[in-house]
Image (cartoon, helix red, strand yellow):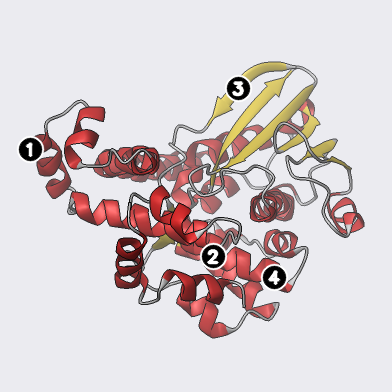
Amino acid sequence: MTATCYSTTATPFHGEVALSYWQTLARVAEREGVPQAKIDRTLKSTAHTSAISVGQYLTLMRLGARQRDDFGLQVGRSITPGSYPVLGMTLLSCQNLRQVLEQVVRYESLNHDLGTSCLDIGANESRYVWTPNPLYLPDSKDEISFHLVVSVFAGIRTFAPWLINQHIPIKQICFTASEPKNLFLYRSFFDTDILYNQPNNSILVKSDVADWPVLNGDTASFSALTAYADTLLNSRESQQDLVWKLKTILPEALRRQTYRIEDVSNQLNMSVRTLQRKLKESGCGYKQILDEVRKQLAEFYLTESSISMSEIAFLVGYQEQSSFNHAFKSWSGLSPSAYRDSQHK
């Protein structure tokens, strides 16, 4: 089927979500009964006012999923152009749907690092594939992974009328997850055949749909907006590239207990002094990044009741349970057990 494949240039380990994208999630969570105090708590320790971490976003997604079986679907149905800061305006200026999807793939990381896109353009059929960020969602059949993918696909369907004044006719949707409850809700919303337990998460359409024109697409605006988006993307990648590389390799380094700065600098093919200097230029230190990754991983593992405390301590680089307990409390203000209890209330 594939004639041309476009895939995102961003690494799946960046770890941020634009605040406007999170706000859509927060509005739905509040509407569905998640206590405001818990919503506000997901914003604690936010390093930037314009973005939150992927971990914080997924924490709120989990809280919402406990309120409603089809929570991800509700999030996607609530998407507006304002949910996509720079990307939304860029999409509205495109000439056709092919150009729209190409910009989604290229600039997705300006909106979030929740996952990555790939677009396969074939002669007769084309497929859009979306893969959740494996650092946070390593299990493709995880319930929250399913909610997240559904929110992305439902968001695409919801956003389409702003572009073409109608829904995109979808031939088929595939999910890696198992069949959910209330199958008819998903079938009714997407109005197409849906397959579960598939190799990837994808949307299949006829290729001629890609040529459908976008209403009021403006070439002049498109050129200006993509130039601006490129500037943001290049700036983000150049300024934070080393930090992202560290966050990519640290989970495995922690598991192997090879996370000393000497070990990590060797993996990056640079001296310890060079690594420290480059991190200082980026405005952070090695211990700060190490603790951030440890905290994010620990919080993820603590939401899974099947993983013991001793296993979690080891997975985030601690040989002693007591050392992990002390560190986690310094990060979050709660003991690991108290944090786990708070996530299951």
The reply to whether discs 4 and 3 touch (Cβ–Cβ < 8 Å) is no
266 left or right of 29? left
Residue to which mark 2 is pinned: 59
Alpha carbon of mark 2 to alpha carbon of mark 3: how far?
33 Å
Q: Earlier in the sequence, mark 1 or mark 4?
A: 4
Using a 10 Å C-alpha cutoff, classify the residue at mark 2 as few (fewer than 14 neighbours), some (14 to 19) or many (20 or more).
many
Check disc 3 and report its element: helix, strand or loop: strand
Residue to which mark 4 is pinned: 66
Q: Position of residue 176 (x, y in %)?
A: 73, 40
Task: Identify which residue, 126 or 295, lies in the foreground.
Answer: 295
Q: Earlier in the sequence, mark 2 or mark 3?
A: 3
Give the mark count.
4
The amino acid pointed to by label 4 is Arg
Measuring 35% from the left and 44% from the top, which residue is drawn there? Answer: 254
Q: Position of residue 3 (x, y in %)?
A: 67, 15
Task: Identify which residue, 199 or 333, lies in the foreground.
Answer: 333
Residue to which mark 3 is pinned: 5
The amino acid pointed to by label 1 is Arg
Task: Identify which residue, 167 or 283, lies in the foreground.
Answer: 283
Residue to which mark 1 is pinned: 273
